[in-house]
Image: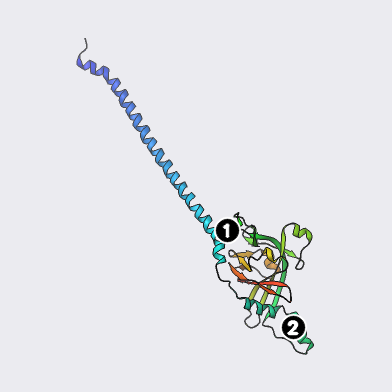
Amino acid sequence: MLVTGEENDLNAPEIKVRQNLNFNIMKKLIYGGLFLAIVGIVFVGCQKNQEIDPQIESNEKSSGESLINREPKFSEELIENMVNDAYSINDDEIHAKAGGEKWRRFWRKVGRWFNDHAGVWMFGDCGLNLSCGPCPGLCFSLGIIDGNSNDGDTASDETYSNGLRVYGIDILEDKETNEEYLMFRFNKDVNDFVLDGFFYIKEDIFFSESMSKQLEKESIQLKEGKYNVYYDKSSGYYYSLVDSYMK
């Protein structure tokens, strides 16, 4: 015959088992809740990143359109005056024959021709976000402009078949102030670099060390901007004065 104390003792293991089961369930619920909370934080973090990326992409794609709406940095009249001074060889010959000499404020200090890939992705209707896209412009490769030296204003058939196009870079000097200016010069490949009559530099960008040395400079940086293009009938070249920093 069992007494009350003994009956309680027999039920004690069952009570402990139930307590252990309840404790384990609570642990699982707590750990499960923590896991879900962590997953939720990570998911929200990923969502935030995914929300930011399209905005960055949108800003990058819209930079071209905003550049289109800007005013050109230099007037065509200024470019024309500089071109007439620095490149007017025929006028000099006429003055020399007449026994005089034309005074020129600007003169071409150094000039070189280069060939390089053309095309930019900066405009919204040009599709892919690549360093070189289907729109006219200078191709930025690895964050620099790295053109190849070219003999004259045209290139070989092989060069053209490789997708390379020709442009010239001249450094002009103002005789009155000794300030230097960087002028782009285009020939038959102008349509590969100029869009709707303007030349665009989509961001501040450096020439490669090799290009800078060929232009007798330690370094040359072009400044972002929209630039006028002036056509000189006498030479048949297109000129664009570009804001730059040279040393």
Q: Position of residue 62 (x, y in %)?
A: 54, 60
Q: Name the residue at the top extreme.
A: 1
In the rendering, which numbered label is found on residue 124? 1
Give the answer, above or below, for where 214 lies relative to 31: below
Mark 2 belongs to which amino acid?
Answer: Asp
Reading the image, the residue beneath label 2 is 91
Q: Position of residue 53 (x, y in %)?
A: 51, 52
Residue drawn where x is 76% and y is 59% of the image: 159
Front position among marks 2 and 1: 1
Quadrant of the rendered structure where residue 15 is? top left
* Nearer to the camera, 136 or 85: 136
Q: Is residue 179 visible?
A: no
Mark 1 belongs to which amino acid?
Answer: Gly
Number of numbered discs: 2
Give the answer, above or below, for where 19 lies relative to 175: above
Residue drawn where x is 20% and y is 16% of the image: 4
